[in-house]
Structure formats: structure tokens, C-alpha cells
Image: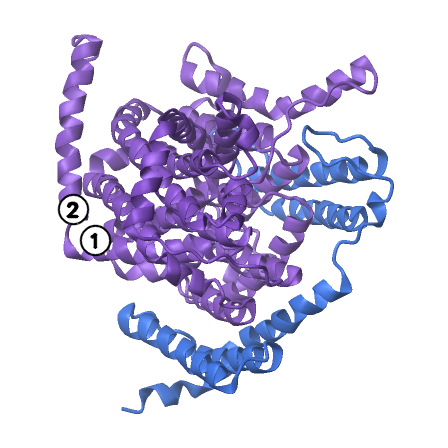
Chain colours: A blue, B purple
Amino acid sequence: MSKADRIVAVILFLMGIGVAWKSTELPIGILPKEGPGGGFLPFWLSLGIAAAALGVLAQSIFSRTPLYPGAPEEEDDGAKKVFVTWEGLVEILRVGLPGLIMILLIGVISIYFAAAAFVFYSLYFVGRHKLTTSIGVTVGVPVAVYYIFEKFLIIPLPKGYLEFLFYWN
Amino acid sequence: MRPRAAGKIGLKGFIRIHHLEILANLFYGLGIALTPQNLFMALIGVVLGVAIGAMPGLGSVNGVAILLPITFAVPPTSAIIFLAAIYYGAMYGGAISSITLNIPGASTAVATTFDGYPLARRGKAADALVTAAVASFIGGAVSIILFTFFAPPLAEFALRFGPPEEFAVVFLAYGTFAGLGGENPLKTVIATMFGLLMSTVGTDIVSGSPRLIFGEITGFYHGINFLVLAIGLYGVGEIFYTLEGGLQARERYQAKVGLKEILSTIRDLSKYWGTLTRGSIMGFFVGMLPAAGATPASFMSYSLAKRLSKTPEQFGKGTIEGVAAPECANNSASTGAMLPMLTLGIPGSPTTAVMLGALYVWGLVPGPRLFVENAEFVWGLTGSLYIANTMAVLVALFAVPLFIWMLRMPMTILAPVILVVCAVGGFSPTQDMFDVYLMFIFGGIGYIFRKLDYPMAPMVLALVLGGLTERTFRQSLIISHGSLGILFDFVGHPIAAILMTLSVFLFLLPIVPPLLRWMRGRGGPQILKTEGEL
């Protein structure tokens, strides 16, 4: 666990330094008439994040006793406690990865067909539900989304290259 | 509200006039809440809320964040009634899975498992469910009455605030998270600053020049929408977190709730009116604190009830007093959390932080002026709380078998459907695919942050309040010609100075115990153990 903690702290530190650099595009000082410049807040905030991330890193490396009230006592094998088990990661990726593919497909084959493909895959192949259940949910979700968003809320959702399918009448 | 010369009316007279004015406004609000459209919104909200609250892993904040985009089509008053009803219903629903499955439906219902599940194992699931519903109703009723009479005076007081005072109030909210949040204070500070940093992406409010446009991506020009973050963290991230655990099947306890069970349980409950009153009142005030919310309120109410009970040895083995105490407090706290959201623009819980963001989306400015300029909105919401509370108790009592049936819906159906709804919800506010990608990335960040104990509520809060924070900070410094001293000016801005001092104290609070321990040498006593998350 503490390994992941340290990696994230280092990433946050680097991000803080990077964003602080980026925010110098606007004035970062307090100007006499206009008050703080546009870069003032982002600059100090990102430096603050970098400093606090260093603190978390130090905390995780040097401290055995909790630094704050209510902290879980780090046991001897605390460093060996894993961030995520392989089984857990597989469970996440089995739905998460198709989910990511669905999101990338939204701009190509419309949100409705991307959602249908994703729901069917997750239900039938991952969840091993009955074919009737899988098809029912696969059809039901996009149809419900279509009627709620396009018809009731009048918010057009992305349709990609299949735009023509939705305007046939 | 008409302006009144201060000091001419005595305190008693002031209160009496206020009460009459408030009662008149309340009837006005009930009239708004009772229109067919708003009544319908409240009913749908309550049913969805109870269902979402009952789902293990999903609580009011997930429900409100995921369903927020569908409120864009109705007027703000109906929309807030819908969201408040979800919030309310979820507090009722959380108890259902706590009692029948021993899995808390939401963190706010964790304390309910302590005595609720033992009761179910003894075949008294129905008693526990009725207790939860009735106690929730009492907590709701007490807190709504407190809300009705506390909100207008507080708003009137806050009307006098200028930029330094407003900044101090916001700063105090961040301070409460760091000092009382219970998590690692350094990580809380990182989460808060990260949220604030994200709010500065887009356009600089003073000079109008583009700011922090990474890689010249056009999606950054409109800024990072709080909904994208909220749905990412509380929708996608939560799904990842739940999937990893792999929801194992547990023994389920069926319950049949009839009129007979309801009446006998109410008779038993009447013995515990002290516990119910204490829990309700305490819950309201704990809920008002920005970092607290319903979860700590329910734990505090449970331990207080145990300490003051005539039969403390029964706690944990299955006593209805142990179900009543957390359930009245969590409902009461959810109303309490709305008080600072509406009057000061500072949310009292993660769910109200998301609601606050919604207010901005609808074009309303939360804070004291809301009571003057949008009386229909404020009083419509207040009125609807009375109605939603009554609806929720009826739904929770009579639809129990339906919700228990629904709990059998496996995660393999729920997770993909929620992911689709999240994608749609991430797209609709800005109509930009970039935000959907960003939302998915926030989901990953949320999952990692959650596992490493980085709190998410201050991040959402800071993103929502970021604009206000920066505007009031810069305005204050413009007033003072660049001197930070204006924030600690006890003569010119006493309220701001007091609040700022209090905030600094809260930020330093977590350093005190380790410092004391260091001075005394190792092995000092463990101080202040905060239980549970937000």
C-alpha cells in the first residue's frame, strides 16, 4: 500500500511543479492596482500541492507512528499490503476496459449503439446472464436514454457517423 | 424581507415578527410544493432515492451526481425538489440493506447495521425496518422545523457580508475539512488545493485571458465542469471500487411489513423519545458543519444513545433503540447540511456540495440573496421537504418487499447501466466529448484516491466554490491595495477576522496531537478517534 502511496505522491509533486511552471504564463505577483494577477492562485496552489505531496512522501517513508489522529496503525507488514490484488484488477478491467472502448466508440457509432454493444457484452459474456435478460437490457437502456434525452430534455447526444439513422423520417 | 432598523425592536419582538413572516412564507412554499408537477418530482425523487440508498455502495451523493443532468429540463424549483427528495429518500433506503443484508446501503447507514442486522437475524427484520422508517421520519420532521426557523435569520445576517467575509466563510469550510475531516490532513489539503486548481482552468475572471490550457486542447477553454468531476468520482470511480470487491451473496432476511407491525413498533418506540429527540437535534447541528454530514452524525447519535441508555448492554445485540438513534440523526443531518448551502453558499455535506454546483448550473447564486431574489425557490424547497419526508416514510414502509427484491439485482447488470448513464451525464452539460474522456479519467483518479484515503468531498467542494474563492480573494486584495492584512483586520472587518483566525486554528489542529506526543516523548495517549468516512 505504501508503495502506491509514494508513487502517487511523486506524481502529484511533479504535476504541481509542472502546473506552477505553466501558470507563469500569466502574472503571478500581486499587482498594485489590480490585486493578484491571473497566475497568482494557480501558481501558489500547485506549489502547495507539490509541498504537501513531499510531506505525504516523507510521512510514508519516515513515520511509523500515525501523524494524525485516527490514523490506522501501520503494522510491520504494512508496506507489503497490496494496493490491488490481481483478482480485483481483473474484475475491474472486465467491465472497465469495455467501458473505455464504449466511450471511445461514442464519437464513431453514436452513443446508442456504443452503449448497446457495451451493455450486451457486459451482461451476456461477462455477467453470464440469460440471453433474454441481456437483450432486454441492451435494447431498454438506449431506448430509455433516447426518449429521456433527445425527446424529453431535447439534449442531442453524439451520433457519430450514424447520424443519418436518426433522421429518417 | 423588508429592511428593519436594528435596535429599535427588542429581541422578543424581532423573533415574533420573524415567526409570523416565516409562517406566511412556509404556507407560500407549501403551495408551490403541492403543485402537480412538483408533487410528481418529489414522489419520483423519493422512490429513486430509496432505491439508490438501498443499493450497496451507492448513496445519496452518487444518486444526485448521476441523475443531476436530467433536471436541466425542468425549472430550478422542481429540480431542487427532485434532488432534495433523492437525498431524503436515500437516507431511508440506506437502512434497508443495512438491516436485511448487513451491507450498509451508504456510509450514512453503517451505524444502522450494528443493531439492525442482529434484529433481522432474530427474525425481527420488520421491527427494525419500521423503526428505521419511523425514526427517520421523526429526525426529518424535527430538522425541517429547525431549518424553517433558522434559515431566514442566518440569511439576513449573511446579507451584510462583503468580499473579505465571504472569503473567510469559504476558507472556514476548507479549514473544517482539514481540522475535523478525520482523514490524513495533508491529503485533505492536497485534495482541496487540487479542486481549487481545477477551478482556475479556463479563463481568468479578472483579465479575461485564457489560463492553464494544457496542450492547447480546446476542451479546457470552457473550464472543468464540476459535474464531470462529480460523476467521474462518485459514478465511475465508485463502480470500479465496488467491482473490485466482487459483491458476494449473503444470507438475506425477508420482512413483511403490515399495519400490525407498524403499530406495535411505534408503541415500543415511544419509550425512546429522549433518544429520538437528542439524535434529531444533534444530527441537525452536526449536519450544518461543512466537514461533517450525516455519517458522523449517525455514529455520534449511536454512541450518545448507548451512553445514556438504561440498557447499554443490549446495544450491538439487536435493540430497536440502536436502530432509532443513527436513523433519526442521519435524516436530520441531511436537512441540516442544506441550511449553510442555501444561506451561505457553503455545503454541509458531499451531497449538498453537488447540489450547490447544480444551483450554479441553473443560473442561481447560492447565498443570502437567494432568500430575497428567489423566494419561490427557497420556500418551494422548504415546503417540499415537509412533503418529501411524509412521502418517504410511506414509501419506505409499504414498498419494502419491492426494494428487497431489487437488491437482488446483480452488480453485473447495474455496473454497465450506470457506466452508460455516467457517459451520457458527462456529455450533456457542455455537449463536448472531451468532457466524457475527462470524466473517465476522473473515475480512475477517484478510484486511486479512494484507495489511498485522499478524501473526495473537499475536492468537489473546492471545484464548486473555486470561482467564489478566487473572486472574493482578489476583490478583497483590490479593496486593500494588495495587503493580506484585510483578512485579519479585527477593527474594519471583525467577522472576517474572527472566521479567518478560526480557520487557521482548524488547519493547525491536526498538528497539535503529534506535536504534544513529540514533546512528551513516545507513548502518549491516542486523542480524538474519528470513526467512519463522510
Residue carrying label 2: B32
Instruction: Work out whether mark 1 precedes mark 2 in sequence or the reverse, and give the earlier one.
Output: 2
In this picture, is B244 found above or below B452? below
**Residue B434 picture location, percent across and down:** 52, 66
**Residue B62 picture location, percent across and down:** 47, 54
Q: Secondary structure at mark 1?
A: helix
**Residue B160 picture location, percent across and down:** 31, 23
**Which label sits on residue B38?**
1
Residue situated furthest right in the rendering: A76
Taking depth in this image into account, of B410 and B357 the one nearest to the observer is B410
Taking depth in this image into account, of B482 and A98 the one nearest to the observer is A98
- Pointer 1 with pointer 2, Cβ within 8 A: yes
Residue B431 is left or right of residue A49, and the answer is left
Q: Residue at x 21, y 34 (%)?
A: B372
Q: Quadrant of the N terminus of chain B?
A: top left
In this picture, is A92 found above or below B100? below
Q: Amino acid at mark 1?
A: Asn
Given the image, what chain letter belongs to the residue carrying mark 2?
B
Residue A38 appearing in the image = no
Residue B171 is left or right of residue B38, and the answer is right
